Amino acid sequence: MLAHLKGIRLHFTGTVQGVGFRPAIARLAKELRLDGEVRNTATGVTAELHGLSSAIEQFLTSLPTALPAMAHIATQQHNEIPYQIQQGFHINLTEHSAHHITVSVPPDIALCDECVTEMHDPRNRRYRYPFINCTNCGPRYSILHTLPYDRPATSMAPFSMCPACAAEYHDPANRRFHAQPVSCFACGPRLWLRDSTGQECATGENALHQAAAWIQRGGIIALRGLGGYHLICDATNDYAVATLRQRKRRPTKPFAVMFPTIDQLNAYLQPTPEERRQLQHPAHPIVLITTRHDDGAQQLSSHVAPDLPWIGAFLPYTPLHMLLLEQLGTPIIATSANIADEPIITEFDTLARHLTGVYDAVLDHDREIVNGCDDSVIAVIGDRPLPVRKGRGMAPHPTRLPIPLAVPTLAVGGQQKNTIAIGWDDQAILSPHIGDLDTLESFATFDRMRETLYRLYRFEPQQITCDLHPNYDTTRWATQQGLPLVRVQHHHAHILAVMAEYQLNEPVLGLAWDGTGYGSDGMIWGSEVLRVDPQGFQRLAHLRPFPLPGGEKCAREPRRSALGMLCEIFGAAAIPTDDRALATFTPQEIHLLAGLASKPTTIRTTSMGRLFDIAASLLGLCHIARHDADAPMRLEAHFDPNLHVKPYPMPIDGMLIDPRPMARALMLEQNPTVGATRFFHTLAKLIVTLARQEGLPVVLCGGVFQNRVLCTLALEALRETGLPIYLPRIYPPNDGALALGQLLAAAQGIQEKR
């Protein structure tokens, strides 16, 4: 008998803490009558099994299908150990270590179907409990102080479990076995409603009813969610949405809409099968979905997303959101509580200090948000996701670098859509979205995020990597830290981020198209065609530079970029002053800006983002941007996939791609839909032409490739070349992934200088 007994030790890395991994191991071991233990460690999860050899083999075979949905094994090691007589199978205390934490941070997970059923069952003790959760769902990263992931290391530590919850927590057969945030009405967080002065005016179920009544009357509620406060109002009420816009000083930028159920969402929007799948992903991200316009469609307020044919839609992911939406029965605006592009607010005192007068009441609770996190945003290109923003449920995210780092390294990213990353050996961790670093509050959030990653992973950098731009706040900060510094050119970092995602270590043709990036020559780049390999990059092609009269103001006023392009075509003294792109200028302004455009000291750029602005202005679609990416979004909204059009001329002469012939044609285009459609086909043809010239695997990245129309056309055209195509799937194509590319540059030992 003893000859058939053996022991085995297993070690797992990846997303294996906070997702029900240990309970799944324990349940399977008990089913197979194996003895031993499982515990969290600084690097993952370790299990020891003792029992019949046949049972251990069956355990290894059955394990992949026994794991919870959010669990992901990156590596699995096992070795045989001497058999020992044990007494049952146990989940033991976490093994602590002074070394780096390398286990993945557990993500926040949307409410699971089992908890939804319990929350709706009047016989269940958690009936209508606004904080219900189990091992398969609920808060994780947002409540986490330190790793490894155990209740004392979370903001649930102050809530002592009642006997009923403790019994579930310690029962291996229960779905809440070792669910760290487990609680109930008797022992969990408390819900209340504050009025606009901050005074508590209702608690529990009554707070929920009064909050719903405020919304039904056209009011605006601030609600504490998982990663921060949302501002909420009725998305079908014109007065409520217009009031929110006025109070938040957000005139036109689209709002996200939360729908009670997928069926109700279908009454307003027309999601594709992949968009429905993304909506129901365990993270429940915001997904960009086309609106319905048929006779049976229900309509949101016209103020939700002015002039756009799509909505950023998502489903309720916490029990509190779900209970509120069920009571309302209508979709709601659920937008981050913040000012402009600043980080989401996570504390009531900050909310009251900055947003008093914006909300009418606050639906609040006393479970602390340790780590703030904006909602994730996903676009779908055909049948594949394209991340626009990595936040709640999807970050921090681990990646293996194709080349290991020599020393632990901090990457500080860029100025806009900032994220940061830490790395050591071949490990890289990219932070959640932080935002634009244009205010003191935003940069304070950058600093808190850095401290959070240091704390969670016991990390101390020995070098820093940053953007080449000398005036980025991140670059200035990095130069003041007294550590070795690796500077990385902006568009090179874009391409390296995709190479890191796909583990590429061979030469590629990278198209890094965006609004602004500091070039190696001190110029403003933005339409870069680079050959990239582990030794660095070679600049192969870019747009013919054109002037930006007014510099950074051109990013907010597409008409200025258009005027600069007209000066390139006709000369400053001969520009057609009656062109529609110039209609909002006075004659004096045209004369002044044309003179400025012709000066040799005026900034010139190769920016593809500004070319989008030029096209939108020349077509009469957008002269002054109302929000970030306004002009490109309007071009996308006017694209007609059913139109059969010829591309505009866009000749390539050596390294220079000449946009002037296309710009002249856009001036004469009478139909903006035809013009927008031809514009996108022109860029798709350009991409294929460049790809065929080099014959290398193609990487598409930079903020311009957030555009779903351009991505779709480019992918369709590139498939005919037979070349490998790499478009981001896990990380955003925009500046939200720069830090990952900076880490890979540091691993390659690249040091770029002006």
Image (cartoon, helix red, strand yellow):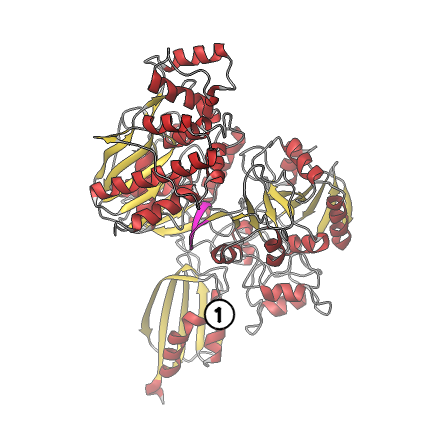
Q: Nearer the viewer, residue 517 or 629?
A: 629
Q: Residue placed at 39% from the left, 43% from the top?
A: 644
Residue 41 point in image, percent of width and height: 42, 60
When the figure is inspected, residue 608 is found, relative to residue 424, above or below; the finding is above
Q: Nearer the viewer, residue 461 or 132?
A: 132
For this view, does 364 lie left or right of residue 315? right
Q: Does residue 193 show up magenta in the picture?
A: no
Tell me where residue 240 sits by quadrant: top right
Residue 753 point in image, percent of width and height: 26, 28
Q: Nearer the viewer, residue 577 or 302?
A: 577
Reading the image, the residue beneath label 1 is 24
> Is residue 542 among what the camera can see?
yes
For this view, does 337 lie left or right of residue 596? right
Write the start and end of the magenta stretch as one range.
380-388
| Disc 1 residue type (three-letter) | Ala
Callout 1 secondary element? helix
Q: Does residue 381 show up magenta in the picture?
A: yes
| Image quadrant occupied by the C terminus | top left
Residue 628 point in image, percent of width and height: 49, 33
> Is residue 461 among what the camera can see?
no
Residue 620 point in image, percent of width and height: 49, 27
When the figure is inspected, residue 174 is found, relative to residue 452, above or below; the finding is below
Q: How many marks?
A: 1
When the figure is inspected, residue 17 is found, relative to residue 645, above or below; the finding is below
Q: Residue placed at 50% from the left, 33% from the top?
A: 630
| Image quadrant occupied by the N terminus | bottom left
How crowded pointer 1 is (Cα within 10 Å; few <14, some 14-19, many 20+) is rated as: many
Q: Main secondary structure of the magenta part?
A: strand
Tell me where residue 244 sits by quadrant: top right
